[in-house]
Amino acid sequence: MLFFFFVSLKNCHLRCYRPKIPDYMFRRVVRASKFRHVFGQALKNDQCYDDIRVSRVTWDSSFCAVNPKFVAIIIEASGGGAFLVLPLNKSGRIDKAYPTVCGHTGPVLDIDWCPHNDQVIASGSEDCTVMVWQIPENGLVTGLSEPVVVLEGHSKRVGIITWHPTARNVLLSAGCDNLIIIWNVGTGEAMIQLEDMHPDVIFSACWNRNGSLICTACKDKTIRVIDPRKEEIVGEKEKAHEGARPMRAIFLSDGNVFTTGFSRMSERQLALWNPQAMDEAISVHEMDTSNGVLLPFYDPDTNVVYLCGKGDSSIRYFEITDEAPFVHYLNTFTTKEPQRGMGYMPKRGLDVNKCEIARFYKLHERKCEPIIMTVPRKSDLFQDDLYPDTAGPDCAIEAEDWFEGKNGEPILISLKNGYVPGKNRDLKVVKKNILDNKLSKNTEKRGPANKSASPTPSRVRTAVSVWGGH
């Protein structure tokens, strides 16, 4: 009896020294969810991409972009900026002489694959330009230094690149000049310039599900929801996170906005907001006191958000629901090595036969390591509840339609028999006759409605060739 009493006292004494547990774990209740037992697993060394000199540039982007055909990684490059594009099956040690995409004169800061053409990728750089590239069907055989189109309009480095989710040829870029430009890539024109909305550096920009709105996080600690075609702010929240370190903001499929940032005490936070009522957050959770910026990756089909901290060695995942506390902690996948960046595979690139619901490409200092997330299931049959119809590669509308005010919901496909990539067409850019351009500018100057002498017309309907279809 005395022995048990002593053990009890000892355990009580130990409990006094337990480390602080984040409040998102404290509030966790046992609730039914098919994602509670998601199992993360890093692939073996022979399935990793080795001997890659990952970029050391001090910019909080993911440095990696993946699609069902290729993985692209921003690398160290002398005398300019470059990134690798590797076919997914090209694992193992990557030769130092392997060809790169190397047209920028300054370090590459961000890259993004076109959702409507698996061979088209856009890049933003410190050289103030955005470039769009066409990758050959089977990958690079020689270095690629000639982009299909160079988009010039920023006066400082371009750190954010993101394609429109449903409209062909529409690309958003944001630079350290606090300017957002929305381009028609098919004509090489800057169609919309959002100039006076951000007084400081833009940390992130994200389209909503149908691409009618964008949300941004800025260094002035404000989250903004913007209608880009009306060029107006439709919702904003000052001091969404009070800490000085970078924030991130993404749209969820129901229209709410999910943010990550830091508290005044430098604790990492995540929050959920309703754009129609941004005075008060729907939900705020404290995380931990690490310095790494949290990069959120969202799966609209399952409503699961994955948080990958730069410099962390873990991936936390949360389920967003309509029940309080709305953001439910699921689990954490931990590895030994910290991550320099992270790529996230679109749903159509996953293996449905293995119940894979997410795949990450984790960047180390010298390699890229795939990590798969699976839901354990005993049945070999297709799991309808894990794989509702997902966004496919076909665009809903053309660029001109979107700039004229039309919207298109994502065109969904079934993954029941797996995704089979179709044939991609070449990207063709039809530039306007430069004399017509000058003529229209002269007419504008003579007219009373001349707003600014921008290098490209603001809203011009032009002919564009169709590309990227299947």
Image (tube, grey):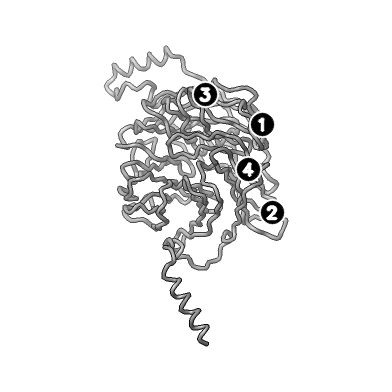
Residue identified by numbered label 2: 382
Q: Nearer the viewer, mark 3 or mark 1?
A: 1
Residue identified by numbered label 3: 464
Residue 195 in the figure: left or right of residue 41 = left
The amino acid type of the residue labelled 3 equals Val
Q: Residue furthest bottom?
A: 1
First-in-chain label (4 vs 3): 4
Q: Answer yes or no: do the residues labelled 4 and 3 have beta carbons within 8 Å?
A: no
The amino acid type of the residue labelled 4 equals Gly
Q: How dense is the environment of label 3, judged by Cα within 10 Å: few (below 14), some, or many (20 and up)?
A: many
Q: What is the secondary structure assignment of the residue under circle 2? A: loop
**In this rendering, does residue 462 appear at all?**
no
Q: CA distance from mark 4 to mark 2?
A: 16 Å
Q: Nearer the viewer, mark 4 or mark 1?
A: 4
**In this rendering, does residue 203 appear at all?**
yes
Residue 217: x and y in percent read: 37, 43
Residue identified by numbered label 1: 423
